[in-house]
Image (cartoon, rainbow, N blue to C red):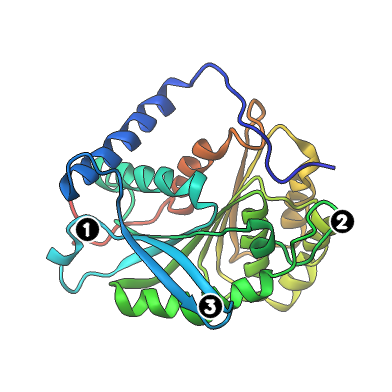
Amino acid sequence: MPTLMIPFTHRKPNLPFVIIFLFVALAVMNVAAQEKYGDLTIGDKIRFNSKVLGEERKIVVIPPFNYKDRPGEKFPVVYVLDVGNNLFATFGILNFYSVVLKSLPPMIIVGIVSADREKDYLPSPSKECPTGGAAAKFLEFIHAELVPYIDSAYPAAAERTIVGHSAGGLFALYTLENKPELFDNYLCIDPSMWYEGQAYIKKIQGFFKTNGKIKKSLFLSLSNEPGMGNFAFIDALEKYAPAGFRWDYVHYKDETHNSLGFKSLCAGFEKLYKDRELPVDAPK
């Protein structure tokens, strides 16, 4: 049985990704220097008292640079799970694509900190993950409390993306099957589709049958670990996904479950926004 996360694998770096990684590091340092010299803290740190969860949650919001100087403009929102691994990478990558390549619009990034990711992301407990089982409540927190707060406190556009890796990727697909109106785009990095005997692969046929006109975008990345269950999920997408459901995937044959994250974020945003035209007034 595969684990939900495994240690990073070290290998000779790929040069294009080294360049992007350096840009990520410089972007973080640049923004930090603008806020306070030598301070690597970026974004708005929010302590959110959730009535749904009955506890305080830490949220990190990184709006586009100088967004207050652009009144009236609204920005797509990216909700990031597994903040420790994905938040700064997402920030640097989105800045690279929006500022340097100008192939993506500027976006608001929302990182949701989880003290117990298995509890938050998994729909039920299991022998491997006994603390799991609060995914429904975590989803309700995002839907009923966090999204309305972000929409009221920041210049948020209607378009939303969710990013998740492993159990976080499974949770992203859980949101698709349970609250499909909440997100427009799903970036799932090697999601744990093996969980509960591939229950969420089995449910997708019925979901598409009752949502035949759904228009969403999904990007899926696969590592070199076939036990994650994602090949079976791709088979289900090929059989049952309706025409309006845009989806794509990349199989990283030389990457492990944990080492494919950075590449997946780059490829995912590229493919989710493929063939989309930026607004005529987009920053140049």
Separation of marks 3 and 1 at Cα, in angstroms: 29 Å
Say what amino acid the circle numbered 3 marks.
His
Question: Quadrant location of residue 186?
Answer: bottom right
Q: Mark 3 or mark 1, which has the lower sequence index?
A: 3
- Disc number lying in front (1 or 2): 2
User: Would you name the residue on which mark 1 appears?
Assistant: 282
Which numbered disc, 2 or 3, marks the residue that appears first in the sequence? 3
Residue 2: x and y, percent?
Answer: 79, 41
Say whether marks 1 and 2 touch (CB < 8 Å).
no
| Rendered location of residue 25, percent (x, y) | 33, 35
The local secondary structure at tag 2 comes to helix
- Tell me the tag on residue 143: 3
Specify the amino acid type for callout 1.
Ala
> Height in image: 14 above or below 109?
above
Image mark for residue 142? none
Q: Nearer the viewer, residue 203 or 237?
A: 203
Q: Amino acid at mark 2?
A: Gly
In the image, 114: left or right of 178? left
